[in-house]
Amino acid sequence: MRPEEGVLTSRGRAIGAVLALLTDELVVVCNGFPSREVYALRDRPENFYMIGSMGVAPAIGLGIALARPDRKVVVFDGDGNVLMGMGTLATVGALKPKNFLHIVFDNEVYGSTGNQPTISQSVRLEQAAKAAGYRNVERVRELDDLVHEAKTMLKQEGPSFLLVKVSEMADDVGRVGIEPAAMTDRFRQAALRGVPS
Amino acid sequence: MPIPSKDFVSLLQEVGFDFFTGVPDSTLGGIIATLIEQRAYVPAVREDEAVGMAAGAFMGGKVPAVLMQNSGLGTSLNALISLNLIYLQPCLLLISWRGHDGKDAPEHLVMGQVMTRMLDLVRIPHRTLGAESAREDIGWAAQVFMKQRIPVALLIKKGILS
């Protein structure tokens, strides 16, 4: 156990706190436990759960944000995921979509494969995002701070990056119970609501 | 007679393609210059990122195309098979065929040789773009895109576009 582990909130609690703030935002959730946890905590048609293509969640979110500039897009990501697709921090920073919020739940391990360490303990991902050009960047550890920053960033012009330090604990949750193709349809309908066809 | 890149872009836009991203190759230079002029190109830093952006754009109501050198097919393969093919998210892949006929720099030779078999293996339909048949080739790709909702590739050899 890391020295700070005892005081860190679990990812499930952190995710739950952010989900409670959402209204009609479009949410892309990275593969692994985060998708399962969001599905168990608050499934909604505006959620897109990934099962493969690790590292690509912010790219999908960016595509949605560019196609639907009138909708806020929130990406729930992990440290292993960000490290795998780190170039996308640069693409987001360069394109500067105002409707893009990137929340990274950083537990410093690859949770789905047995908690092997990532390198996010020594690499400050939020500083990489800042250097890449994200407009607002914050790093939080406490649940109260998370709620405060998430509320602010949901209203602010982005792109915004919120790094949330969480414990290694994963909620005891099952797999996402929606077939991938059905999820594409459901999410697409939610994303296109209000658009004349 | 090669097809002017501007005309090729117009043909794509006529059938509805309206979101363009990718990573450049010299063979695709004219297409990208045309799209940049129209402010219609979203530059990506890796091909799997471009494929991810295209998937997002599709779910946001766009009809996406991704440009890449065939080396990028290797980079984007996991996204294509674990995102697009599983979630039924279509995109048009405009892939330059480097290493065709074994005439290219060494780094392109293996991919140039195995690319079509690799696409067959992962069940991504593909056609080689013809200078005379461009309209028909694009029409075919658009049909696959709409009906099967999977990635579909047009392979572009050097000299086909001007």
Image (cartoon, coloured by chain):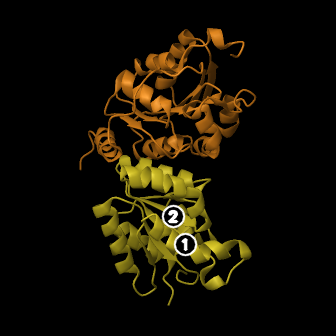
Relative to residue A46, is residue B55 depicted above or below?
Answer: below
* Residue bearing the label numbered 2: B35
Residue B110's spot in the image, x, y percent?
65, 74
Chain B palette colour: yellow
Q: Which chain is orange?
A: A
Residue B135: which numbered mark, if any? Answer: none
Relative to residue A21, is residue B26 depicted above or below?
Answer: below
- Identify which amino acid the numbered label 2 is placed on: Leu
In the depicted view, which residue is nearer to us: A120 or A18?
A120
Q: Residue furthest front?
A: A114
Query: What is the chain letter for disc 2?
Result: B
Relative to residue A100, is residue B9 depicted above or below?
Answer: below
Q: Residue furthest right?
A: A122
Q: Residue at x 56, y 43 (%)?
A: A55
* Residue bearing the label numbered 1: B115
- Identify which amino acid the numbered label 1 is placed on: Met
* Label 1 Cα crowd, 10 Å radius (few <14 / some 14-19 / many 20+): many
Residue B133's spot in the image, x, y percent?
39, 84
Q: Residue furthest left?
A: A197
Query: What is the chain letter for disc 1?
Result: B
Q: Are marks 2 and 1 on the same chain?
A: yes
Q: Evaluate whether residue A98 shows in this view.
A: yes
Q: Which of disc 1 and disc 2 is earlier in sequence?
A: 2
Q: SS for tag 2? A: helix
Q: Residue at x 62, y 23 (%)?
A: A138
Q: Residue at x 40, y 28 (%)?
A: A174
